[in-house]
Amino acid sequence: MWTGNLSYWLVKPHPPGPQVQQLNAWLHKPPVDIIAHGLYWCVVLMIGAPFLGMAALWISIFQATVWCIQTYYTYFSWGRTVLEQAQAISESSGEPVELAIVVTGCDTGFGKDLALQLAEKGFVVFVGCLQENSTKLFGQSDKLRPILLDVTKDDHVTAAAKSVTEWLSSSSTTSKRYLHAIVNNAGIGKIGYLDWLNLSDFEQCMNVNCWGHVRMTKAFLPIFKQQAAAQINQNTKMSFYAPQIMNMISMAGTCHGGLSAMPYEVSKTAALAFSDGLRLEMKPWGVHVVDVNPSFHTTPLATNIFEGLQHDIWEPLPDQLKEEYGKDFFENYGRHVERLTSQQWDPSITVEAMVRALLSGDPPCRINVGMDAKFSLLLYSMYPTWLRTMCMQLLLPDQTPAMLRKQPSDSKKED
């Protein structure tokens, strides 16, 4: 793996000296911190603007060139998919090649559709389902292999890794078998104001949306490592070998606050940080790490949200909390959530983007899906914090709880 090792030259192996420490402390005292921040950006924009303009021009040209190359690579002959390349090598060597993908959260939504499409393309898909009834929907075939898989349970994940290992090393086949990818798709959502939620709501989201990714990756990492080592030790060039770890994140991992969905947003932000760190660690092993960040799509997770809020969050609240906020506060919030989540895209677009990435020998690091995710939300994620907060305040309905509203005086009540 190529590295620049700039930290060796730029970072001294000892804390800053007393003068630098004093300067740092002074720069953080008001009003110096505000003035210094403003002066810094004035200098950067005045001096750096011409250079930034030229850099932006060259980056745009470079990016356009890369897009053209990727398009050509994807859609023309020398840019064959990993399956097509594996097939070509099979024909030349006389040994069939099979590629497997493990997908979690296949009971409904993205996971179910993805598993079916991947099997149709020719992958062997280990279909991870939370419910045993869901595994029966896929049946048993050479391409679809349903497994009971709760990503919050170590024994389930270990059993899934064992099933894949047994398939890879099976003596009943003459094919060369490889684990091509794991897709960490399983996810849950919890929304509502912090005051209405329990700590367990945060724990549930973290356990599925973040720790589930970590647990799955840890379990399957030995397989990827063994495959990478075998590729080197056998001194063979497997041009189709481009293994992946694909993590279903969300635009909620970068755009926060609009729905008061902290359990979900915290877990997705953590999952995004995990992916970013994992991407660097997987470089030496030749494993690509891909984030998928859809906005709202028509899936079970993003439908009937208001009814769920009413039944699961508001109704169980103690009467005191209900009085403190007021029913109208909850209804305003519920209508706001319903309005924002009603802008849902066709989920097949997300599945198609995931399939394209899994077929590619050089997948993108991050895939934003949805017109809003590609444009407005991407821009929003780059705003400074104060501007993001202001944008959210402009979108939110009246947020004044009942206990903070001015109550009518006793004399007015008597009138």
Image (cartoon, grey):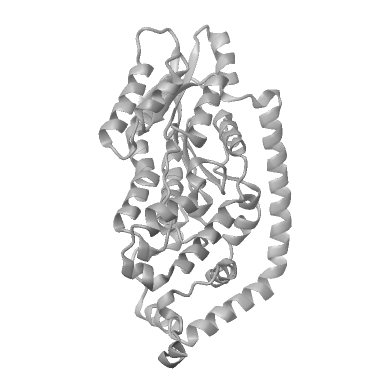
- In this orientation, which residue lies closer to the viewer: 415 or 274? 415
Q: Is residue 252 in sight in this rendering?
A: yes
Q: Position of residue 142 (x, y in %)?
A: 45, 13
Residue 395 position by quadrant: bottom right
- In this orientation, which residue lies closer to the viewer: 69 or 390? 390
Q: Position of residue 357 (x, y in %)?
A: 57, 34
Count of marks placed on residues? 0
Q: Is residue 57 above or below residue 353?
A: below
- Identity of the residue drawn at 44% across and 66% down: 327
Residue 314 left/right relative to 66:
left
Q: Position of residue 109 (x, y in %)?
A: 50, 36
Q: Is residue 219 above or below residue 266?
A: above
Residue reaching furthest to the left: 155
Q: Is residue 216 above or below residue 259?
A: above
Residue 16 left/right relative to 77:
left
- In this orientation, which residue lies closer to the viewer: 291 or 78? 291
Residue 28 position by quadrant: bottom left
- Identity of the residue drawn at 41% across and 56% down: 266
Residue reaching furthest to the bottom: 411
- In this orientation, which residue lies closer to the viewer: 269 or 31? 269
Q: Is residue 1 in sight in this rendering?
A: no
Q: Position of residue 13 (x, y in %)?
A: 35, 63
